[in-house]
Amino acid sequence: MAQSRQPDALVIGAGVIGLSTAVRMAEAGLSVRIRAARPPQETTSASAGASWGPYELTDERVLHWSEQTRLTLEKIAEDGSSGVRLVRGLEVAPFPLDPPAWVRDLSDFAICPAEELPPGYVSGWRYTSPLVNMPRYLEYLTRRLLGNGVDIDIGAVNSFKELTGAARVLVNCTGLGARYLVPDDQVYPTRGQLVVVDNPGIDTFFQDWAAHEDMTYILPHGDVVVLGGSATPGSESLTPDPARAAAIVERCAAVEPALRNARVRRILVGLRPSRPSVRIERELVDGNVLIHNYGHGGSGLALSWGCADEVLSLSEPA
């Protein structure tokens, strides 16, 4: 019967942004429920690579959000069931590039000597970063929510008005769905494609700074490796592209030849919820106190806990 009491917060969306926000609010002592059109394992987040890194640097808030997220992920990595591991790896560029300040501040940052760079690259550095097996991580976040009495109700939300009185605060973590729910015409899809292959023995990550929509990254997750990737702004196709998948494998094999004959397990396609800048904002809509938390593009994981902290601070009664 207690479930009929109005909760403090109703989080709309069950991707990594929604789940992280709900965990942060519930563990701060708020009563929370989640409403989502799809369960966590069917969201865009489940198809992500995924690695930490503050790459959307046009917004001055991103560095703080990213740092708070890294610190949280490092703690989560202590739980072997979380899907989060701390992995050392190499980041490179095919052009002269000074390492960004955020990576120089990491404790084990080191410039990579030119003779150790893969062919075609002229700049590079090594560091340790959280790598996340997203399906396992989403399960982990769901377990934390269940442990705090948070239910995930599956059902579409067509307007904020229909949620009037559902909670003291509504939190909009709908990602790409914000295009229609808000509506926000600044939100657009960026199609991404990954290839998951058997791991031939790789235990370090690799990623490059691509100057076009095809980037190269290699993210080991136990017995599989996630190979990437692509970023096609405006495309909404969820159909795997075999030619693009083959090109991804070829680029990755040029860096790690052992990948050339690795068995392909699956091809993943997802639509990143892109926006010129992340929207975190509190407003009054249709009589509801509403906090927006969307528009993270391909940096949802990397910004998740920092943004959740900000939502928590905005959720306090005015």
Image: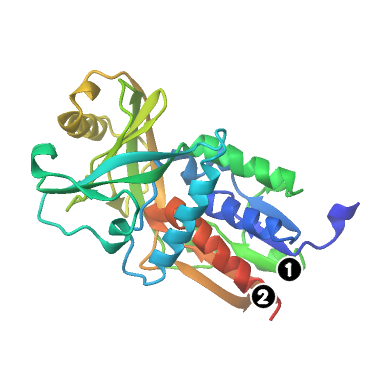
Label located before the other in sequence (1 or 2)? 1
Q: Nearer the viewer, residue 224 or 212?
A: 224
Q: Residues within 10 Å of mark 2 (few under 14, many from 20)?
A: few
**Residue 106: x percent and y percent?**
34, 54
Return the residue at label 1.
164
Q: Are marks 1 and 2 in contact (CB under 8 Å)?
A: yes
Figure label count: 2
Return the residue at label 2.
286
Q: Which mark is residue 113?
A: none
**Residue 99: x percent and y percent?**
22, 57
**Residue 31: x percent and y percent?**
76, 59
Please state which amino acid type lies under the numbered disc 1: Thr
Please indicate, yes or no, whether residue 39 appears anywhere in the rendered image. no
Q: Residues within 10 Å of mark 1 (few under 14, many from 20)?
A: some
> In this rendering, would 283 be left or right of 90?
right
101 is higher (above) or lower (below) than 117: below
In the rendered image, the residue lying farthest to the right is 1
Q: Quadrant of residue 311?
A: bottom right
Q: Nearer the viewer, residue 144 or 242?
A: 144
Label 2, secondary structure: give it: loop
The alpha-carbon separation of the residues under discs 1 and 2 comes to 7 Å
Question: Tell me, what colour scheme is on the image?
Answer: rainbow
In the rendered image, the residue lying farthest to the front is 107
Label 1, secondary structure: give it: loop
Q: Quadrant of residue 203?
A: top left
Please state which amino acid type lies under the numbered disc 2: Asp
Q: Nearer the viewer, residue 241 or 22?
A: 22
Q: Quadrant of residue 159?
A: bottom right
The residue sitting at 23% across, 49% down in the picture is 110
**Residue 250: x percent and y percent?**
18, 30
